[in-house]
């Protein structure tokens, strides 16, 4: 994601108003690598602007997604998360704590052509699932052998 100042310029260039609420959302997302939910962002913004509505935060996030300044990350049945890193990358999702981490898995998968005519690929997402180091270090030891 661009800096909050660059986003202000982008919004103005695209004819969108730059409100204090939008600026607060820009600030709340800038430099964040945790892939926060809209609720988390709303909580952050409310520390500066207690009267900001949840709807306003969602609308700003939708505007950022539409401008390709933020990516949407969907984690199984969990809430939608927002990723300010719009560069091509993949994700690791911890199945224990739901932490999402940016990773670079390298080569991209390609849609097979045989038997799939008519499909139009718009994006490829690679998501690895497993246990993060924090959860792995707190997991109870496994017992090997027969009882």
Image (spheres, rainbow, N blue to C red):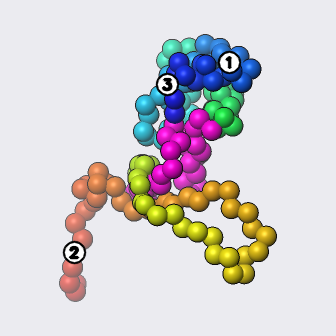
> Residue 77 in magenta?
yes
Residue at 56% in and 48% down:
73
Residue at 53% in and 42% down:
86
User: What's the CA distance linking mark 2 and mark 1?
Assistant: 61 Å
Pointers 3 and 2 in contact (CB under 8 A)? no
User: What's the CA distance linking mark 3 and mark 2?
Assistant: 50 Å
User: What's the CA distance linking mark 1 and mark 3?
Assistant: 14 Å
Residue at 68% in and 18% down:
12
31 is higher (above) or lower (below) than 139: above
Helix, strand or loop status at disc 2: loop
Q: Nearer the viewer, residue 51 or 132?
A: 132
**Figure quadrant of residue 133:** bottom left
Which contiguous range is marked in magenta?
68-96
Mark 3 closeness class: few <14, some 14–19, many ≥20 residues within 10 Å = few
Please tell me whether the stretch drawn in magenta is mainly helix, strand or loop.
loop
> Residue 6 in magenta?
no
> Which of the labelled discs sits on residue 12, or is there none?
1
- The residue to which callout 2 is attached is 143
Mark closest to the chain's N terminus, 1 or 3: 3
Residue at 43% in and 60% down:
106
Locate residue 68, reporting x and y percent: 63, 38
- The residue to which callout 3 is attached is 3
Give left or right: position of 32 versus 136: right
Nearer mark to the viewer, of 3 and 2: 3
Quarter occupied by the C terminus: bottom left
Locate residue 49, reporting x and y percent: 56, 14
Specify whether residue 46 is in view.
no
Mark 2 closeness class: few <14, some 14–19, many ≥20 residues within 10 Å = few
Locate residue 8, reporting x and y percent: 60, 19
Helix, strand or loop status at disc 1: helix
Helix, strand or loop status at disc 3: loop
């Amino acid at each position: 994601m661009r800096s909050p100042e660059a986003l202000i310029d982008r919004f103005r260039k695209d004819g969108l108003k730059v409100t204090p609420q939008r600026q607060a959302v820009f600030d709340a997302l800038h430099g964040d690598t945790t892939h926060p939910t809209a609720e988390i962002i709303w909580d952050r913004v409310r520390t500066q602007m207690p009267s900001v509505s949840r709807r306003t935060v969602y609308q700003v996030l939708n505007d950022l997604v539409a401008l390709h300044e933020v990516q949407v990350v969907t984690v199984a049945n969990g809430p939608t998360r927002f990723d300010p890193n719009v560069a091509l990358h993949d994700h690791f999702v911890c199945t224990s704590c739901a932490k999402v981490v940016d990773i670079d898995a390298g080569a991209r998968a390609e849609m097979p052509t045989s038997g799939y005519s008519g499909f139009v690929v718009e994006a490829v997402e690679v998501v690895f699932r497993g246990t993060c180091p924090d959860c792995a270090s707190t997991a109870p030891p496994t017992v090997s052998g027969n009882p």
